Amino acid sequence: MKNAILKSMFAGLIFMFFACGETNTVESGTYQGTVDEVEPDKTEIYVKTDDNKTLELYFTDETVLSRGGNEVEFSELQKGQKVEVEVEKVGKRLDPLTVKILE
């Protein structure tokens, strides 16, 4: 019984690892890519960069989101949009300073 529970827990962890996908930490800088996922309840986006890295970005109170030079609401973000993000690496976390919707 104990073995079955441990095997079940291990299988669940493996599933979660593969289901979540892999994100990358990059150096502070500016990157262009495509919005791969938008999580409005967490004000979080995943951006697939032009060099095939996935950035996990949680918006902060200081993050500026813009489109056409005007500041816009988080609700403007949609999967598939081209964006330019300026990020600051803080430990293993990436803080988005600016996110520009390019299209």
Image (cartoon, rainbow, N blue to C red):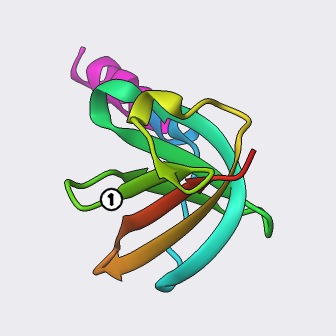
In the image, is residue 98 above or below residue 9? below
Residue in the picture at 56% in, 57% down? 69
**What is the x, y in percent for residue 35?**
64, 43
Q: Amino acid at mark 1?
A: Thr
Q: Is residue 87 magenta?
A: no
Instruction: Name which quarter of the figure residue 61 lies in.
Output: bottom left
Residue in the picture at 53% in, 83% down? 29
Q: Is residue 64 left or right of residue 50?
A: left
Instruction: Name which quarter of the figure residue 21 lies in.
Output: top right
Q: Is residue 7 left or right of residue 2?
A: right
Instruction: Name which quarter of the figure residue 23 lies in.
Output: bottom right
Q: Quadrant of the C terminus?
A: top right
Residue in the picture at 65% in, 39% down? 36
Magenta segment's dominant SS is helix
In the image, is residue 15 above or below residue 8? below
**What is the x, y in percent for residue 14?**
49, 37
Q: Is residue 35 left or right of residue 64?
A: right
Residue in the picture at 22% in, 22% down? 2
Camera-nearest residue between 46 and 71? 71
Q: Is residue 10 magenta?
A: yes
From this viewpoint, which residue is outermost toward the top?
A: 1
Q: Quadrant of the N terminus?
A: top left
- Part of the protein shown in magenta: 1-15
**What is the x, y in percent for residue 89?**
37, 80
Q: Is residue 15 visible?
A: no
In the image, is residue 22 above or below residue 45? below
The residue carrying pointer 1 sits among few (fewer than 14), some (14 to 19) or many (20 or more) residues within 10 Å by Cα, namely some
Camera-nearest residue between 20 and 49? 49
Element on which disc 1 rests: loop
In the image, is residue 69 above or below residue 81? below
Residue pointed to by mark 1: 63
**What is the x, y in percent for residue 3?**
30, 25
